[in-house]
Each structure stands twice: as structure tokens, then as C-alpha cells.
Image: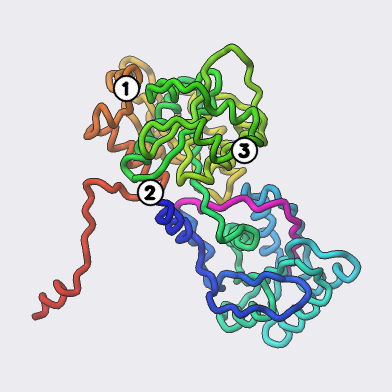
Amino acid sequence: MSDAAYKDEMDAEAPPVATEDPAPPPRAGADETRGAQPANDQNASEGGLAPVMKPVPRITIHAFCEFPESGSTIQRAGEDRRLAKAHLTVHMGGVAAAVEQYQTASTPNLIIVETSASGNELFSQLGALAEVCDAGTKVIVVGHLNDVSLYREMIRQGVNEYLVAPLKPLAVIEAVSRLYIDPDAPPIGRTIAFMGAKGGVGSSTLAHNIGWSISTSFNEDVVIADLDLPFGTAGLDFNQDPAQGIADALTAPERLDDVLLDRLLVKCTDRLSLFAAPAVLDREYEVDTESCESVIEIVRAGVPCVIVDLPHIWSPWTKKALLAADEVVITAMPDLASLRNTKNLVDLIRQARPNDTPPRIVLNQVGVPKRPEIPAKDFAEAIGMDPALVIPFNPGLFGAAANNGQMLEELEPKGKTSDNLRDLAQMLCGREANAGKARKSFSLKKLFSRKA
């Protein structure tokens, strides 16, 4: 996938922005004019893929609401992973409370104010707020009128963003992100984290094959990051033996740049690269949470898709990497231990990521002869969601692929397992396969010829 096409696709996920905003007159506060149209686009990401947005930097946000519902929504937005670094406080009282507070205190980086006023009263309130705002403070107004002319006038007055109530947490997150993320900065890639409900369920095998499928079936550049440092199998699965890898980056993340990254990555195909684990036991590995986060952020800045292969351990850095991913895939087997652990993981992820797509559950090695199993239907009922994929037990195919250092699609490109993996890959990256699927074209000529 070309860089231009990648950027176009990422830009398409953002809501429309106003294109006729004249430069605002000099005033205190809200020094950069930029905002989304006050249309009801707040549910655009619900029910589909979670939007890929860079985390908002360490800023201070004060919100002043008139209605408890708005305050609760903004508070939930502040708990989202993308606003984790920001410090948010919510107050009641609307614009009047904000004006009163900042008469004796300096203003934060961002003020969110809710108002039900309109017309001259509304702009009188905003004028009073402007009088007490420090230079550089940005302002988001939450109103109750979906009026384009009102929106344009607010932008002329220097308001940075206008949102229409009732709010959704994701709309607040996107609005804040647009104000603090450079629009000319390159897009970031989608991160997909894979974790097994227990050891030996095939999570790494699934992660590697999904990465391969995304790179081959959807023509996307993919990096697979193997974070199981002592026992990682990515090198084996791709028949690679790199001298350097992800451990070198984790030990000195401040040195990681594009040049060093290219040297540490192993190129498996034109579109698939491997950030391999050392998989040796001659030293102990202490992974720092911030180092892991930094390395993943640097990698995702250069490719559309990063597969994060997490080991089955529970530590601060694995938890952080799991919850920070754009998509989460949990691989389980149809047994009691997997059921318990899957339910615990699902409950944690749902609680910590209320504005994101729920985790995808893959039930692997189903139908082992003479082994008592929990039926897939009962498994789904217990965890409260259906598996995204159920993979039948096929030791011949999986064993041959592992021993040969090949992917499943290489051995059996037209098999049911390969088809299912491509379907899951499409679900995770939201793209259609580029091979074997001709699109129907719409022709005005054909339409008119029918009437002739």
C-alpha cells in the first residue's frame, strides 16, 4: 500500500472539517481556529472499527457543564486510553462558572464549556469568557443547536470547536485529538494485539498468520512485533534467524529511529517485516512499560498495521500493551481454564476500553478426538459474546507449517482454514481482499440503454 493511499485512507476516518474558516480576529485565548462541523457524526465509529488516533499529549482540560449527562460523558471520555496522558476535571455551572473561576486563576490548555443559550446571549457569554482566557488556551463549546450558521459565527469569534449535545465520549475524544495532533503529521498504523487465554493455545501462530494474510491479501505493509523475548516463535515460523531484534530496541528506546529500526527489522516479504525476539536464555529480560509503549509507537508511525504478539504473562507492560492496542484478539481452547481466563480478560477490556471495539475471540483446536470440550455455544454464552472464529483441530496442517517455517496459506491457499483466517484479517483491518473479487461497476450507459 503506497504512503499516499495509506494517508488518504486514514484521513477518511476523520469527521469533516470546515473549509471556509476565516482567520479569527485577535483575542485572548483560542489562538488556533479549527473545528468539525456540528453535524451528528458522533456515532460514526460505533459498531465498526475503532478510529486510529494518536494519544493526546500531557495537557490540562477543564470542563464546565450545564447538565449532569454532559459532565458524565466528558468524564468517561477522559478515562479513555487516548486521553490517558491528559488531566481532566469536570465542573458544573456552564460558562458562568468558568468565567468566575478564571477571574482569579490562570486558564488551562483547553476549556470545554456547555451552554444552552443562543443568539446574542450566547456570544455575550463567550465574550465574557474570552476576557479571562490566557493566550494559547483553546475553547470547545458544547451547544444544543445544530446550526451551521451558528457554527461558522463561533469559528469567526475564535472558538476552536463546536459540538452538539447530546455528546458521545468518542466525539469528545476526536475533538480534543484534532486540536492537539498536527494535521500534517503522517498517520499512525493500527495496532492489533494477540494474547492467549493460556499457554499453548496457538495465539502466536494465529498472530503470525493474520499478519501474513493482511500483507498478502490486502497489500498492506505489516510489522510483526514478537514480545515473548525468551521463547518467541516468530523467527521459527518465518524461517528467520536474525542477529538483532526487538530486545535491542527495548533496552535503549531513546536510540530507536528510522535508521536503526530498518536495521533491526527482518524483511520477510516486500510488505511483511519481523521484529523478532532473541529467544535465548543467556540473560534475563526486564521490560519497562514506557519503553515498550515507546517502541510500539515508533513502529506504528511507519506502517499501516502492527501485529503485537504478547506472551502469556501478566505484568504492567503486557497489560498496558494489551489495553493500548486498537484491536485485541484473544485465542482460547474449549476448556475450563481458557473459559475462565477469557472471561476475565473480556471483562477487564470492556471495562477499561468502553469506547473501543470489543475484543475478538478465537476458539482454536476445536474437536480434538476423545478430549472433553466445552461446546462453542456454551463458551460464547459464558463470556457474553460469540467467537469471531472457530478453528477446527488440524494437527497435520499446523504441524507441517510450523516445521517448515511456512504460513498456513502457503501450504493450503484454498483451504477452509486459510479462508477463515482471511475473513478474520479483513475484520481486523476493515479492508476487502484485492484478489479474486471483481467489483461491479455502475454504468449510466447501461441504465439508459434499458430505457431505450
Magenta region: 49-65
Q: Quadrant of residue 76?
A: bottom right
Q: Are marks 2 and 1 in contact (CB under 8 Å)?
A: no
Disc 1 secondary structure class: helix
Q: Which residue is mark 1?
A: 401
Reading the image, the residue beneath label 2 is: 1
- Residue 50 place in picture, x, y as percent: 50, 51
- At label 3, counting other C-alpha atoms closer than 10 Å, the crowd grade (few under 14, some 14-19, many 20 or more) is some
Categorize mark 2 by other alpha carbons within 10 Å: few (<14), some (14-19), many (20+).
some
Q: Which residue is mark 3?
A: 293
> How far is disc 2 from disc 1 in space, using C-alphas?
27 Å
Q: Earlier in the sequence, mark 3 or mark 2?
A: 2
Q: In terms of secondary structure, what is the magenta stretch mainly?
A: loop
- CB atoms of marks 3 and 2 within 8 Å: no
Q: How far apart are labels 3 and 2 at the CA level?
A: 25 Å
- Judging from the image, the colouring scheme is rainbow
Amino acid type, callout 2: Met
Mark 1 to mark 3 CA distance (whole Å): 31 Å
